[in-house]
Amino acid sequence: MICVRLRTRMCRCGHDHGRKDWPIAWLAMNRWLDNFAYRISIQLWMFVLAAILAMLIALATISFQAIRAALADPVNALKYE
């Protein structure tokens, strides 16, 4: 996960260090789903696809905010501070 905090003059990106927990999440989901009568199996590609989609959404959001900040007039930003 990527957390973005946007200010008028500064953009900062921080990275969450929970990316190494996906095997634990996969094992926990499999154990939880074992308790159901109609069970589905969780495949590894589902976690990979979710991670790729999350990265694409984060990239699109960060790109949009960076372009918007780059095109903004700095005079307007300084006028309201």
Image: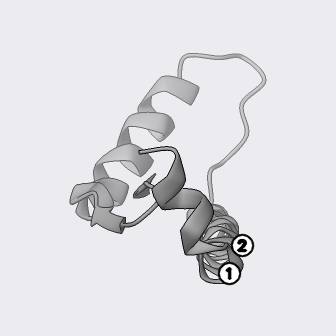
Q: Which residue is drawn at 72% across and 31% down?
A: 39
Residue labelled with disc 1: 67
Mark 1 packing: few (<14 Cα in 10 Å), some, or many (20+)?
few
Residue labelled with disc 2: 64
Query: Which structural element holds mark 2?
Result: helix
Q: Which residue is drawn at 40% across and 66% down?
A: 9
Q: Distance between the residues labelled 1 and 2?
A: 5 Å
Q: Where is residue 50 in the image (x, y as percent from the top left)?
A: 64, 61
Q: Where is residue 51 in the image (x, y as percent from the top left)?
A: 56, 67
Task: Quadrant for the N terminus, please.
Answer: bottom left
Which one is nearer the viewer's eye here, 61 or 75? Answer: 75
Which one is nearer the viewer's eye here, 77 or 59? Answer: 77
Q: Position of residue 23 (x, y in %)?
A: 33, 58
Q: Which residue is drawn at 26% across and 54% down?
A: 18
Q: Residue 43 is drawn in which quadrant? A: bottom right
Numbered label attached to residue 56: none
Which one is nearer the viewer's eye here, 21 or 3? Answer: 3
Q: Which colour scheme is used?
A: one colour
State if disc 2 and disc 1 touch (CB < 8 Å).
Answer: yes
- Total numbered circles: 2
Which one is nearer the viewer's eye here, 77 or 60? Answer: 77
Residue 48 seen anywhere in this rendered image of the structure: no
In this view, 69 is above or below 33: below
Q: Where is residue 4 in the image (x, y as percent from the top left)?
A: 43, 57
